[in-house]
Image (cartoon, grey):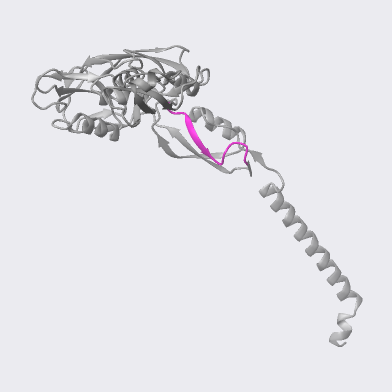
Amino acid sequence: MTVWDFILSKVFLRQLAFAAALSVVIIWGVLKMLDLYTLHGRTIEVPELQGYHKDEAADILEANNLRYVINDSIFDDELEKGSVARQNPAPGTEVKRNRTIYLTTVAILPEMVPMPDLVDLSRRQAISLLETHGLSVGQLEFQPDIARNAVLKQKYKDGPIEPGTLVEVGTPIDLVLGEGLGENIAIVPMVLGMTPEQAIRTLNNASLNVGEETHMNGEADEVKVYLQEPNPVEEPKYLEAGSEVNLYYRSTADFDFEEYMEQLLSVPIPDLRGLTPDQVESRLERLSLELGLETFDEGATRDNARVYRQEPAYEEGMIIRKEKTIDVWYRPDEETENEDL
């Protein structure tokens, strides 16, 4: 029997058909096993883990046939220690069974930093260095010393603190400053409309401390300064360096600070017509406005001039932003008196 005759024989063809069928069954079985192993077409939605304690998060992931690895930890005073701060993949992501979820948790132990050496630095340099190290300014005290606003001592809880001492991030450090020669008076800055952090920094930079802090809407998440005592809006206020300024906060969610500040910092446009140059300066100063260009017509001097025109022009009920300028034009007194103003 030749090879060709054997290939065409019934025995060979039956064996070939059996082998082909067996191969199809094996391939189909392998593919089904792969589908079962990889859960083809079946996914799990990653649950929300942020805010849960890491042990609770582990139980949730185990119940969903997911694994986890804590790959980082952060320091955050606003979050519960030991809780999950971030996760990857994000909540709602579709993943396969046994997928590893990477968690970032909030460190249980507080972050510590070395205390910097602030002695002999200026007040501004010391405040900036404290902020760089994650520390805050406590109380400012002043003592007689020729070096005005230079740091004489650095204190923590009424006692000295040495440079290099490990302290918790956010710790307030008290500064003892030189008050210089003579009277040490500070101008009260306006902190209305500022966040608490901005207001405290501004007051500290002016050699003043924060006194009582009152939250008028309870403990809201985002607040700004609504009132301050003393209030320098109407006229400048002066305090002895190291004095306290009381702050009152309102929630930005419940109050329109933009409109409030616009009204607070605006005044009615004054009618300057008929006033002398000295009267103009006095009126504008009282309203916290600036005198702009003064134009004197022929024959007009500071002794005989009166305003006959101003820009912006006076209109009843119109307001102008404080610190804006008003230009004025003068004529000699005898001409102005004969005008119907």
Residue 91 image position (x, y, % from top left): 59, 36
Q: 17 above or below 182? A: below
Number of labels in the image equals: 0
Tell me: 168 left or right of 340.
Answer: left
Extreme residue toward the bottom, this view: 2
Residue 166 image position (x, y, % from top left): 23, 30
Confirm whether residue 283 shows in the render: yes
Q: 129 above or below 180? A: below
Asked if the magenta segment contains residue 118, the reply would be no
Name the image quarter holding residue 121: top left
Q: 222 and 76: which one is in front? A: 222
Region of the chain picked out in magenta, as a range: 81-93
Q: 99 and 75: which one is in front? A: 75
Name the image quarter holding residue 191: top left
Residue in the picture at 35% in, 20% down: 334
Confirm whether residue 222 shows in the render: no
Residue 10 image position (x, y, % from top left): 91, 75
Residue 69 image position (x, y, % from top left): 49, 40
In the rendered image, which quarter contains the N terminus?
bottom right
Q: 101 and 238: which one is in front? A: 238
Residue in the picture at 77% in, 57% down: 28
Tell me: 124 left or right of 31.
Answer: left
Tell me: 202 left or right of 192.
Answer: left
In the rendered image, which quarter contains the C terminus?
top left
Extreme residue toward the right, this view: 10
Residue in the picture at 78% in, 64% down: 23
Residue in the picture at 69% in, 46% down: 39
